[in-house]
Image (cartoon, rainbow, N blue to C red):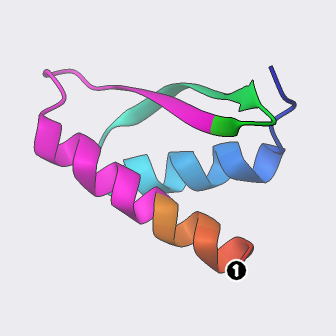
Amino acid sequence: MSELPARVAELAEQAAAADGVEVLQVRLTGGHDGRVLRVVLDADDPVEADVVEQVARRLSRALDAEDP
């Protein structure tokens, strides 16, 4: 597992907060052939798929803006 910059976790938390969900875990996995950023979300009610999609898109845009 690769080390995850603290800024990535901050961006994930900001992206999730916009939809009222909480980030439980952020992990970067993979290696030379590709990496995967895994973000685990939680809320009082079940997290709907459209919320997951919105958070993922928001986080993707934020990551692109930080490192174009």
Please, what is the three-letter code of the amino acid marked with disc 1?
Answer: Pro
Q: Pick out the residue farthest to the front.
A: 33
Residue pictured at 74% horizontal, 73% vertical: 67
Q: Is residue 19 visible?
A: no
- Please tell me whether mark 1 sits on a helix, a strand or a loop: loop
Residue topped by disc 1:
68
Q: Which residues are magenta?
A: 36-59
Q: Nearer the viewer, residue 19 or 1?
A: 1
Q: Is residue 15 magenta?
A: no
Q: Nearer the viewer, residue 55 or 33?
A: 33
Tell me what residue is drawn at x 32 percent, y 38 percent.
21
Residue 43: % across, % down? 27, 26
Residue 22 on image: x %, y % = 41, 33
The percent coordinates of residue 56 (x first, y second) are 38, 51
In the picture, the quarter occupied by the N terminus is top right
Q: 57 or 19, which is in the foreground?
A: 57
The one nearer the camera, 52 or 45, is 52
Q: On the picture, is 34 further left or further right than 40?
A: right
Callout 1: few (<14), some (14-19), or many (20+) C-alpha neighbours within 10 Å? Answer: few
Instruction: Tell me residue 55's x, y (percent).
Output: 35, 51
